[in-house]
Image (spheres, rainbow, N blue to C red):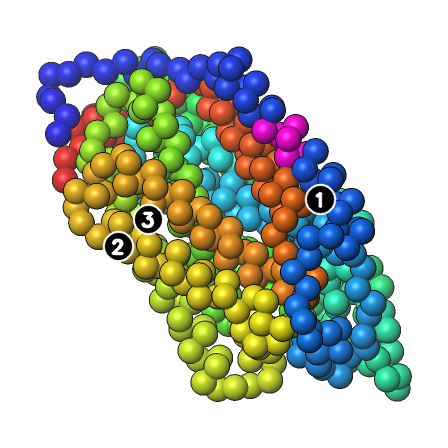
Amino acid sequence: MAEAHVHYNLEERYVFTPEQKKKLLMGIGIGAVLFVIGAILVYLGVGSHEAHGATHEGAKGTAHAGAGEHHYNPLTRIWANLWLNGTFFTYIAAMGTLFVAIQYVAYAGWSASIRRVSESFGAFLPFTGVVLLITFFVGGHDLFHWTHHDLYEKGTKTFDPILNGKSAFFFAPLQAGSFPLFWFIRLIAYFGIWYTLYTVIRNNSVKEDYITQKGDFTYHKKNITFSAIFIVIFGYTESTSAWDWIMSIDAHWYSTMFGWYVFASTWVSALAILTLAVVFLKDQGYLKMVNENHLHDLGKFMFAFSVFWTYIWFSQFLLQNYSNIPEEIVYWDERMEKLGGVYSPLIIFNVAVNFIFPFLFLMTRDAKRRSIFLKVTAFGILMGHYLDFYVMIMPGTTKEHGGFFILEIGTVLLFACSFVYVFATTLAKTNLIAKNHPMMEESLHHNI
């Protein structure tokens, strides 16, 4: 419990030391080197967990029934890794802004002392936006089956009536099989709107630090308005972006719960990063006003949304497997039975690490208030939901040619270190504490 007469330094700034920069730049460099080496090995056919008995014919029969078979390009695994990490870190960056927006709209006071930490997540959006744009232009034809023009030629053997029925969602107002203008406009709009609103909220928050007149809540009120706008827009576009970027990989498959599923996975991942960042800063001597009660709330968030993710996962899995509709069951067939069964162990491990592990670790009150438990659980959640994205993306793109080798290690290291570097740089640009936040006093004396 925070003492009533303790005076904290609300002017403190995070110092992104040269040593920390050097380590992160080294990590980025190592990741880039491993990525290049891994890409070369993949092109040469090394490091793939290609299954015995898994063939392209089997993949065609499950994922693209009735559609023409397209030759597998070894470079697809490279594009798939870039797409996997690009989407994963895009959502984490956006979820940081969502966390801030929710605190504003809910008039939450407990989080005022840690708000600057989550504010810094959104700075990574331009970087992942560029990655997704380049990856789509270079490798989109290999990642997305629906981009092949021969699938829309009526009267041919390759004609796909299911994809033809969905063509307007991808190509309108252009002809099916041409450049996916509608899909591309949405991609640009997602990043443009998310980053613009993030910038407005962030700038207003920083300007609030320089208010000299006591009781001036101008910027705080503006952020409540912009946060409400962000929540409404993001609540819709998060689902549609998940359809565009991930669900359309398995072009025949659909799930009405998929937007919520991706939200649950990336929201709890962002909470895990926020928790790790707060604990790291405290270990470095910052955020002295953050006490075990704040950590308890972060632990409760991770615990609750791990359970929520499990509920969404099980509901989607149970309903689709029970109904056994071809366009729904195909997603689970590829991951659990087809493609030689190479992905089936990951399904079991996915549920264990994303539900059982955080559930058991954070079940008690004391566990949520101890930094070592929070560190271990948050790291496990991050690894688990990265695996979750792997299971979502890799079977539909690389088929039986997937794997986790030098390429995958290098890509995740490259993105993770880049994210931390941008995050730390943004965090160091202004006060670590939003000192003029109207509910700062409540946060300083937070007790549960």
Residue identifier under label 2: 360
292 falls in the magenta region: no
| Horizontal side, residue 275 vs residue 74: left or right | left
Task: Assign a secondary structure to mark 3.
Answer: helix
Residue identifier under label 1: 38
Amino acid type, residue under disc 1 in the picture: Gly
| Residue depicted at x 27% and y 44% | 299
| Horizontal side, residue 146 vs residue 20: left or right | right
Residue identifier under label 3: 302
**Callout 3 environment at 10 Å: few (<14), some (14 to 19), or many (20+)?**
many
The quadrant the N terminus occupies is: top left
Identify whether 342 is placed above or below 324. above
**Callout 1 environment at 10 Å: few (<14), some (14 to 19), or many (20+)?**
many
Which label's residue is closer to the chain start, 3 or 2?
3
The quadrant the C terminus occupies is: top left
Which corner quadrant of the image does residue 58 belong to?
bottom right
Residue 136 in sight here: no
29 falls in the magenta region: yes
